[in-house]
Structures are given as C-alpha cells and as structure tokens.
Image: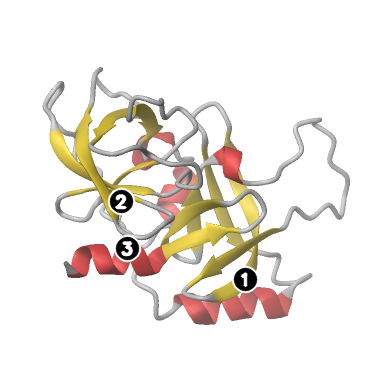
Amino acid sequence: MDKFQDIEKAKIKIMGKNGQGVYVGNNLFLTAAHCINFKTSGSMVLGDHFIEDIEIQGQRFRVAPWAIEPISDIAVLGPLDDQVFPDDADRLEDFCEDLNPALINTVEPELFQEFEIHVFSHEGGQVPGKGEVCSPGSKSLFIETKDEIKGGTSGGPIVDESGGLVGIVSNFSGNDNTGVHPRPHLTLPLWVLRKLEGAAL
C-alpha cells in the first residue's frame, strides 16, 4: 500500500541507541525519549550541543534533540544550529524537501472502541494489532499486537488503517505484546505542533 510505503521511507534509524523514529515534516522527526542520548544531571553550559546520528533511506545525518518529554517517552529531533553547523542543517533540509512525512492523526477515536493499527518494525514491514483509548483525553494509546514488538522497534511509528500516525512505540511495551504508547498530538509541545506544516492538525 502506498500509504505504508511512504511511512516506511520516512522511518529513521537512530544509531546511538539502536532505536528508530519517523519524519513528520518541517525537518522534524519523532522518536521515543529513551532512544536518544541526553544528560539528566540538569547541567548545561553555553555552547553545549547534543548531537544524534540518524540514518534515513541509506543516508546519514546529524540532528539535535529539540524537545524531550521523558515521562511520556517522546522526543523531537531537528536540524542542528544553522549558524554553528550550517552544512549539516542545509544538507538535512535539502534531503527533507523530497520526503513525504507521516501525518499525525488528531481524530479522537471512540472511548473503548478498538481500531486497527500497524507498528512499523525496525526489521521492515508492519506488525498488525488493535489500538484503544481507555480514558477521555488520554495522552496514551493502549495497543495489543499479533506478534511481539522486538527490541529496536522503540521510537517507531504506530499508524491506523488510513496511514495516520497515532502513536510512537515507547518503553512501556510489555512482554505480552501489549503496551501504552504516547499519542503525538496530545503529548508534543504546542510549538512543535504549530511547526508541523501539512500535518492534520
């Protein structure tokens, strides 16, 4: 299906912690917070740069964490500072111009109503399953998959039957093929959502 092929092409591999993520437009990528390297000591000094290496469609780029929400386990990666790293920023922007983003689905499903989902594996292809929202306005999506969600799949996209992005694989997946995962349109900072041009907001 074309809708899933586009998402497969938009999927990234995060080299440092062997996770994945997905391109969502405007040079921004979503992943799980535990897939990236960031200091938790609270100490930052002027000039600090947090850099992640990603691979997409066989090409490697350097990006920076733009927003991290460790409790929900979701993070945003974006271009490096274009004044300090102009070549890196330009190269990523040029690449993303021809890349179709995964569009975030903001339609609220009926409470306790199961719907079809697909989890994009780091091994290629999708793991089918069911998704369900268990409380009004919940920031989390409960999913149950037919097959195991293996290590390395963290940070990858969870989409519905229409190909809309409804969740990101987090570290809350259980050994019984179930888990609670962040819903991007409810867990991301507002400034990120406003920046995602072309997303279904």
Q: Which residue is mark 1?
A: 61
Callout 2 secondary element? loop
Residue 48 as seen in the image, left or right of residue 144: right
Mark 3 to mark 1: distance in Å?
Answer: 18 Å
Q: Do residues under tags 2 and 3 come within 8 Å of each other at their CB atoms?
A: no
Q: Earlier in the sequence, mark 1 or mark 2?
A: 1
Q: Residue at x 88, y 45 (%)?
A: 45
Specify the amino acid type for callout 3. Answer: Ile
Q: Earlier in the sequence, mark 3 or mark 1?
A: 3
Specify the amino acid type for callout 2. Answer: Ile
Q: Which residue is mark 2?
A: 104
Callout 1 secondary element? strand
Mark 2 to mark 3: distance in Å?
Answer: 11 Å
Residue 201 as seen in the image, left or right of residue 46: left
Please provide percent x and percent y for residue 111: 15, 22
Q: Residue at x 31, y 57 (%)?
A: 199
Circle 1 residues within 10 Å: few <14, some 14–19, many ≥20:
some
Of residues 201 and 119, the one drawn nearer to the viewer in this rendering:
119
Q: Quadrant of residue 138?
A: top left
Q: Earlier in the sequence, mark 2 or mark 3?
A: 3
Q: Residue at x 37, y 69 (%)?
A: 9
Q: Which residue is mark 3?
A: 7
- The number of numbered badges drawn on the structure is 3
Callout 3 secondary element? helix
Q: Is residue 176 above or below residue 79?
A: above
Specify the amino acid type for callout 1. Answer: Phe
Please provide percent x and percent y for residue 139: 36, 28
Q: Residue at x 32, y 63 (%)?
A: 7
